[in-house]
Amino acid sequence: MCRPFPIHSHRQIISTYKKEDAMSTKEKKGHMYTLALMVTSAAIGGTLQYGYNLAIMNAPTLFIQKFVNETFQERWGIQLGIYEVTLIWTFIVSIFSLGGFTGALIAGPTSVRFGRKKTMLLNNVFLFSSSLLALLSRTAKSFEMIIISRFLVGINAGISMNVQPMYFGESAPKHLRGAVSLSSAVFTSFGLVLGQVVSLSEVLGSEPCWQYLLASNAIPGFIQLLTLPWFPESPRYLLIDCGDKEACLMALRRLRGCEVQRDELDEILQEQNETKGERAKQPWELFTDRSVRWQLISVAVLSSAMQLCGNDTIYFYASYVFQEAGISAGQIQYVTIGTGMCEFTACIMCNLLIERLGRKLMLMGGYVLMAGWAVVFTVALSLENSVTWMPYMSMTCIFTYILSFGMGPAGVTGILPTEIFNQTARPAAYMTAGSLMWLNLFIIGMIFPFLVSSLGHYCFVPFGAVCLLTASFIWMVLPETKGKTLAMITKEFYRLNYRGHGKMDPEVIQAQYQLGEVFHSTAL
């Protein structure tokens, strides 16, 4: 818990900043890669876990179902039917989403109380507990341990998906903010690919090794636990929440690898001045605050659309479509890795383009492309029995749909709460966004089988409609945030939040901004 702090004047902090800026050229160069290493350390044990823990549950499906059936026979002499085994398996898979929902609710208060970095370190308690339960579940002959394990690792992923983008967004300079924040999505997709590779039958995806597969997520967490303590806390958290200007300046110098830029310090001081005396807000307080109404609506719509767009469910058809295209059953597990590589490649491309094209264009373009490919995929599924080359078109649609998702929604959505909310509202905004994301993931996982049975080949029509509506919302409501300070973005939302209420603030009309020099995360 941070100590109470006095509000330091702008002159006091600038004076300290000038006195402490004397650094040799050698010292500056020695910290050139601190930001890149910090991002890697945090993400390996952070959002990588989300993608990894989604991917590793595909390979052991039949093995765990068999284990559940054998456990019932040994305990109570009951032979479960296909329906009962499938029901228990569905609960094992779905409990991950409920754990993520719980983690999203925990993330806000813990990130305020303990800080961004310490919250991520403490988060490993859930991960290691989960890994231990999964590892011992087979020996203990308890499928309940697997259920608890998946719930705990869900909590871990829920906290990481909220705190890590906040940590990155508050630590990066303005011209790198998008690229650094987008690293969360890059590591999520990398975790997906890594999980698919580790799940191969030649690695840990075999019947004797499934418990080791489920427990293997402890390795990235252990790497984070060893490396992250060496990196600084979020500079904004140190100054605005803790009032520790010395630690803030030191963190900025380490992360930038050079003297702190005057305009960046001014921006942080301005945010501190605007939020002075305010405590961290709760989610329900955002709903009654007119000044952040459309910011909250934007985050809620885009977080929900990330799951309701159907990207995760497209993997449901992958094996079937690949089989129809003539790929043998033994080779499908290798081809499926290509779907994860697609999203990973798209996220890297988005990382390279986001500071040039902007957030709004990347988001809107991604959803428009997804809507188009949903239509093509529906046509291909409908004609696959009458046109010989249609299965290949369906296979193409899978890859292009995932590429379109990775190019925009997968990465840009997580950046927005950092950019459009101030320090006191940001944790609550991430709690709201994360809760909606996990809740919609749970809902879509439960209703998708019913969509398939009732709509058949037309089951992607609702997803296409969601993508089209989301693209329309972005075009009409969301302002571009590239290269802008929080004050500039807030002034743009002023038009929506107070539409029709008195004369427009003249400062809003005159709001201008300067783009920083464009860098990519790969240039770090």
Image (cartoon, helix red, strand yellow):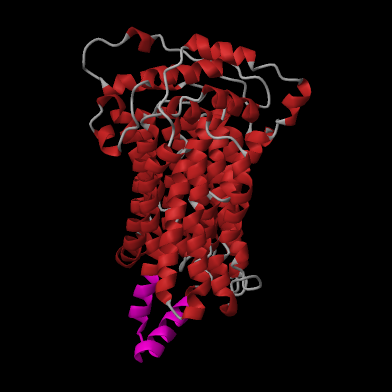
Q: Residue 378, position in %: x, y?
A: 41, 57
Q: Nearer the viewer, residue 250 or 449?
A: 250
Vertical order, 47 against 128 (above or below) = above
Quadrant assignment, res 186: top right
Quadrant assignment, res 349: top right
Q: Residue 386, position in %: x, y?
A: 46, 67
Q: In what quadrant of the picture does the N terminus appear?
A: top left
Find the residue positioned furthest to the bottom.
77
Q: In what quadrant of the picture does the C terminus appear?
A: top right
Residue at (65, 70) in percent of width and height: 203
Q: Residue 381, position in %: x, y?
A: 44, 62
Vertical order, 360 against 230 (above or below) = above
Find the residue positioned furthest to the front.
3
Q: Nearer the viewer, residue 385 or 43?
A: 43
Q: Residue 166, position in %: x, y?
A: 47, 37
* Residue 488 visible in image: no
Residue at (46, 42) in percent of width and height: 163
Q: Is residue 503 left or right of residue 201?
A: left
Residue 131 falls within the magenta-colored stretch: no
Find the residue positioned furthest to the left.
501
- Main structural element of the magenta stretch: helix, strand or loop? helix
* Residue 227 visible in image: yes
Vertical order, 99 against 18 (above or below) = below
Residue 85 falls within the magenta-colored stretch: yes
Quadrant assignment, res 199: bottom right
Q: Nearer the viewer, residue 94 or 316?
A: 94
In the image, which residues are magenta?
63-90
Residue at (31, 65) in percent of width and height: 450
